[in-house]
Image (tube, rainbow, N blue to C red):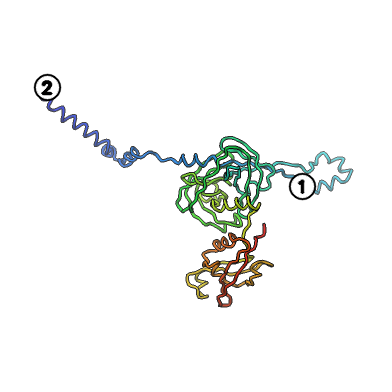
Amino acid sequence: MFSTFRFLILPILSGVVFAGIIIFCFPQIINPGVSNTYITDERLQPVHSYNAGIAKASPSVVNIFSNRIVRDEPNPFWEGLLSDPYFKQYFAQQYQPSRERIESSLGSGVILTKQGHILTNNHVIVGADVILVALADGRELSAEIIGTDPGSDLAVLKIEAPNLVAADLQNQPSNVGDVVFAIGNPFGVGQTVTMGIISATGRNQLGVAEFEDFIQTDAAINPGNSGGALVDTQGKLVGINTAVFSIGGGISFVIPTHQAVRVLEQILSHGQVIRGYVGASMNLLTPSQMKSFGFENQIGLVVTDIAEDSPAMEARLQPGDIIVEIAGLKIQSSLAAQQQVTSAEPGDELEIKIIRNGEVLDKKVRVGVRPSL
């Protein structure tokens, strides 16, 4: 009997081992609800994390607390009443004269230089008397305002501190579908990271600022995130979080890095942002409207108003002129045309092709300096 068992033990053990391998690799045999693909993927592929990129970007993002002193206006009724000695005798103690109170607001900012220059939104610090910046490492510092640009809703602050970490800038255009992270101080709870994708680019005419070319994202951005960072998976700065159309995320708008950096450079160089100006108001004409003027598959801009003493007036542009090219480039959009003008250096000449009374004309407009708001 022992000799018989000895001959059977090897096949039995082999069968047990083989069955174990089959069950391990194909668990749906005993539990049809389990996917072997999921088990295999979980074993072979580690869980992905964006920690390295976030750790790189977080030290450059700061919390901003601003206070402004508000003085209540005197009450005209009480002031008039107490001018009478009789009423003053009985009612003076009940009247509270004009007094001061402090209004606080919070936001976020991004360190752009190791010298302590910080970009944030202008609406975060507008009217502030005292600005306090809290760094990611716990340091708290007073900040001064170097310059503001209400047209883009950006402001530059300056702090003095050693060992500051400046943001690493993204050097390529953002694309719809890119994974991004919003870093800031929502509701004052402290530095927080939320995740989303870029939903759209080139958003404008939103009424958020005068000059708009926003990135749209669904990364959750809430009150207190304004002025904070939107970064990519490598921790590089994609833009400055600026506006939210739905609390809790869904539709949020971000100023692209290249625009924000241009504002910073202009403020550091000139104390303000200098933009090109021609002084003509324009409306967009669709391809179907342009077809009647002999232009196929092209859009145009019709001049609706000319500002007094403006470059457009000096160039003898007129309401009703239809602009079809600026500096040799066909009109692509009203935003692109605005950017061509505002990015031009004052004193430059822009060649503009127009249609007037059915005739195609070439005009030269010398760019001026856009008046301050």
Res. 308 image quadrant: bottom right
Q: Which residue is mark 1?
A: 73
**Residue nearest the observer in this picture, 5 or 174:** 174
**Residue nearest the observer in this picture, 199 or 212:** 212
10 Å crowding of disc 2: few (<14), some (14-19), many (20+):
few
Which residue is found at the position 80% from the left and 41% from the top? 95
Q: What is the x, y in percent for residue 319?
A: 62, 71
Label 1 secondary element: loop
Res. 135 image quadrant: top right
Q: Mark 1 or mark 2, which is nearer the start of the sequence? A: 2
Viewport quadrant of the N terminus: top left
10 Å crowding of disc 1: few (<14), some (14-19), many (20+):
few
Viewport quadrant of the C terminus: bottom right
Tell me the number on the disc at residue 2. Answer: 2
Q: Is residue 218 left or right of residue 11?
A: right
In the displayed structure, 160 sits above or below 76; it is above
Among all residues in the image, which is located at the extreme top? Answer: 2
Label 2 secondary element: helix
Q: What is the x, y in percent for residue 287?
A: 50, 69
Q: Is residue 327 left or right of residue 31?
A: right
Which residue is found at the position 65% from the left and 60% from the top? 370
Q: Amino acid at mark 2?
A: Phe
Q: What is the x, y in percent for residue 67?
A: 67, 42
- Image marks 2 and 1: residues in contact by CB distance under 8 Å: no
**Residue nearest the observer in this picture, 352 or 85:** 352
Which residue is found at the position 60% from the left and 37% from the top? 162
In the displayed structure, 370 sits above or below 237; it is below
